[in-house]
Image: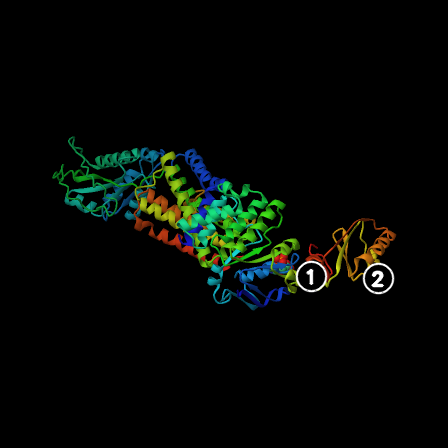
Amino acid sequence: MSPLFTIAAKDTKIMVRDRAALLVMLAMPLGLIFILGSALGNIGEGDSLDTKVAIVNLDEGDTGARFVEGLTSSEDIDAVFNISVREDAEAVRTEVERGDLTAALIVPADLTEKVLADEPVALEVLQDPGSQMSAGIWAGVVRAGVANASAQIIAAHTLQETFAGGAAQGAPSGTVGSPPSAQQIPELAFDAVTVREVEVEIEKQVSMISYYAAAMSGMFLLFGGMFGAFSFVRERREQTLARMMSTPSGKVTIVGGKALGVLLIGALQFIVLYLGTRLLFQVDWGTNVLGVVLVGFAETIAAAGLAMTLAALGRSERAIGGIAPAFIMLFAALGGSMIPAEQLPEWLLPAQVLSPVYWTVDAFLDLMRGATLAAVAPNIAAVLAIGLVLFWFGVWRLRYE
Amino acid sequence: MGTIVEVRGLVKRFGELAAVDDVSFAIEQGEIFGLLGPNGAGKTTTISMVSCLIDPTAGSITVDGNEVATAPGAVKSTLGVVPQEIALYPTLSAQENLAFWGQMYGLSGGALKSAVAEALELAGLADRAKERVEKYSGGMKRRINIAAGILHKPKVLLMDEPTVGIDPQSRNHILETVKQLNAAGMTVLYTSHYMEEVEYLCDRIAIMDHGKIIASGTLNELRDVVGGMDVVDVKVTEVTDCVLDRVREIEGVKQADRTDGAIQVLTPSSGSVLGKLVATLESEGAHVTSITVTEPNLESVFLHLTGKSLRD
Ligand SMILES: Nc1ncnc2c1ncn2[C@@H]1O[C@H](COP(=O)(O)OP(=O)(O)O)[C@@H](O)[C@H]1O
Ligand SMILES: [Mg+2]
């Protein structure tokens, strides 16, 4: 075995026997995930009465405007829905996908034209038919609006419902080749208007416990860096570092071995956190296991970098024990480990990019919602970049005696 | 038998302080070479330069034909190092510690296993090999600290105060171990501030003080520095400067110095001095509790050369 691995294996063995370290590296995050995750239910879940919906009127004529007016001026509707009239159909679609809006209505650009020409035309209701009850109510409201708008209601009026299954992105917004069902009655102009409910694939909601599994893992993986720094200064103080340097191995091998030890310990820690949260708390890390592993690994590299920086800055374990938690808490606060990153004050947001925890937690959450590896690749790159900067700074300033 | 370690004009400065100040010595293959000196003399600094841990300010060191400055890798593989501190991992067992250090010297597989077993045997701790080092007594730790330095059967073993702070039994065990290793062909550089150890073990000795070597040679050569004189150790209740001055005035007293709780007197003829010595001390109010007359030892040599005790 190369001295590099000999040193890393030795550090791992020592770490596994260190009860205090195990407490901080494993018991604390698991405990916090459990407490925070089970105390607070689900993020973004829960149907309030004040359901948020949006209307985008793209109609170039005035039919759309009148229709929208009809919906927004009704007090009954207003009591249940919080309606916003918007311009950007794509932005609204994204918000529905994210779950920020419960449902939306898109009025097509050619509504007036088609109505006058008595051709079939569809109003589009974006919603998640599976999970959100209020979304279904909204579709009903729109349908009723269409029905009211008709001068004469035909009893046999059938609503056509088209399901563009799984069309999350780039869903069609123009006409759809659906044959008009109740049609060709010239006087009943609005009868040709159908309501087409478009199933929007709403991003998977991340449960609170899953959120904290991501947040605490992203944060506590960095504590491997603190213990790595402890190990380095302890070896410096107890002269085992000097003894290693009196063996044929050079400084590069010794420092490399110490860093590799932090990686190995971080990998073991992450395996325990990943499996622990899955088995104990049924956390759903998503199906992209490779992505989760790579993000976790990148964060342990950041931890190894942090170990070097801390070992360079702190002369003693005591000093490092003082600065390391401060460093990590700051990274974690910026990264959304305490409260969701979006809820931080505006002026703090630019500093987020400096926090490896931010990129890691963001990537974990995306992967839980079903993101691809490509989607989180920038996060991985950012974490690695921060880790390398910390590593080089540390090695540059490291003292061996 | 040629020279295996050669140190020439070695200097190490820490700022103003010359911790090692123009030190030269040569160690012959197969001998035990002693570096004797009080705390702060510069022994550890010298050993650290030989083992490539710190760079000399000036001078050169050759180990088995390799220059420390240009071929540290080759020098390090030739050397075994037993540091002054117990440089072991407390939460690992003795066996795990030894296996680690063996691997760091490139041992693996069966060779590692047998080297570890042999070293444990030598340390007399084979039966407690699986216990964590933190549970060991100071003496046992010292023995493992030594064992960790000899796993790869180095040609030259550097031992820096390997018996500091341990019980007499462990100390004897260690001294016997050093003899045993040397008998098996290992060259040893042994530093200590205990003159008995150096007297007992070493073929040749260099006495170091304030970064300089103030005397060197075999034990007999060093004794000659004191020149056929007797050493009289007088234990008294109280030693004042005034008493010391009065003793120095006695005829036949070459030198008188304070050691712990005693006065050490050098004299060519102890017989003629003893009576006057006791009378002088009693008249000064210093109560004599014991008197011993011995051959000069390294302590007296050091006292003679520096005017102070090794243990100060
Ligand atoms: N790294 C260092 N920086 C400054 N002074 C040092 C350093 N190492 C040793 N010294 C000083 O050098 C002198 C010799 O120390 P050392 O070699 O440890 O002596 P010894 O081993 O003989 O007790 C002492 O005065 C010590 O304080
Ligand atoms: Mg010393």
- The percent position of residue B283, horizontal first and vertical second, equals 88, 52
**Both on one chain, marks 1 and 2?**
yes
Identify which residue, A35 or B244, lies in the foreground: B244
Q: Chain of mark 2?
A: B
- The percent position of residue A371, horizontal first and vertical second, equals 31, 46
Identify which residue, A287 or B179, lies in the foreground: B179
Identify which residue, A396 or A361, lies in the foreground: A396
Crowding at mark 2 (Cα within 10 Å: few <14, some 14-19, many 20+): few
For the C terminus of chain B, the image quarter is bottom right
> What is the number of callouts on the image?
2
Q: Along the horizontal axis of the image, is A312 left or right of B291?
A: left
- Residue drawn at point x = 35 percent, y = 39 percent: A206
- The percent position of residue A374, horizontal first and vertical second, equals 30, 51
User: Residue reaching furthest top?
Assistant: A155
Q: Quadrant of residue A341?
A: top left
Crowding at mark 1 (Cα within 10 Å: few <14, some 14-19, many 20+): some
Label 1's element? helix
- Determine if residue A303 is in view: no
Q: Along the horizontal axis of the image, is B237 left or right of B186?
A: right
- The amino acid at mark 2 is Glu
Label 2's element? loop
Q: Is mark 2 within 8 Å of ligand 1?
A: no
Q: Along the horizontal axis of the image, is A155 left or right of A168?
A: left
Please tell me whether residue B75 is drawn above or below residue B117 in the rendered image. below
- The percent position of residue A287, horizontal first and vertical second, equals 30, 42
Q: Which residue is tagged 1?
A: B223
Q: Disc number at residue A49?
A: none
Q: Which residue is tagged 2?
A: B251
Q: Is mark 1 within 8 Å of ligand 1?
A: no
Please tell me whether residue B267 is drawn above or below residue A268 in the rendered image. below
Q: How is the image coloured?
A: rainbow
